[in-house]
Image: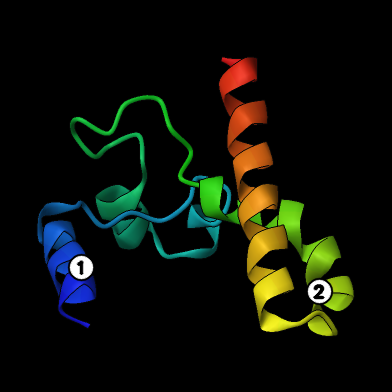
Amino acid sequence: MSHYTEKVSDLKEAPLTIGAFHIYGHKASCQAQYHPKVISNLGLIDCEGCKRFWSFISPFVIPTRYMTEFNRHLFLNLLVNHYHEQKFKAL
């Protein structure tokens, strides 16, 4: 478990933000503080990458449910690698 704690501690310096498409459901003071466009050094990002990733893998939830643990891990690793390759090709 200690390697998880080390990785989480790396996030202490990460800025808090709300995704660009979800920010408008929050009050103005929250928008002014947490919008991706107002956080310095964040770059041109909409902070919706996790949502896009989960949207990509969600069709595979039911088919992988009945796989063995080994096959499910193997399949999900291949799927994540494919997702990353497609993202890098699109750059």
User: What quarter of the picture does the C terminus occupy?
Assistant: top right
Earlier-in-chain disc, 1 versus 2: 1
- The residue that label 2 is drawn on is 64
Label 1 crowd (10 A; few <14 / some 14-19 / many >=20)? few
- The residue that label 1 is drawn on is 8
Q: Is residue 69 left or right of residue 60?
A: left
Would you say the residues marked 1 and 2 are in contact, meaning their CB atoms lie under 8 Å apart?
no
Q: Nearer the viewer, residue 83 or 20?
A: 83
Q: Nearer the viewer, residue 54 or 24?
A: 54
Q: Quadrant of residue 30?
A: bottom left
Residue 43 drawn above or below residue 80: above
Which residue is depicted at the point 36% across and 41% down? 36
Task: Give the SS element for disc 2.
Answer: helix
Residue 82 in the image, given as x and y percentages of width and height: 68, 39
User: What quarter of the picture does the N terminus occupy?
Assistant: bottom left
Task: Give the SS element for disc 1.
Answer: helix
Which residue is depicted at the point 48% across and 38% down? 46
Residue 56 in the image, given as x and y percentages of width and height: 74, 51
Residue 86 drawn above or below residue 48: above
Residue 3 drawn above or below residue 86: below
Q: Is residue 47 left or right of residue 37?
A: right
Residue 79 in the image, given as x and y percentages of width and height: 70, 50
Disc 1 marks which amino acid? Val
Disc 2 marks which amino acid? Thr
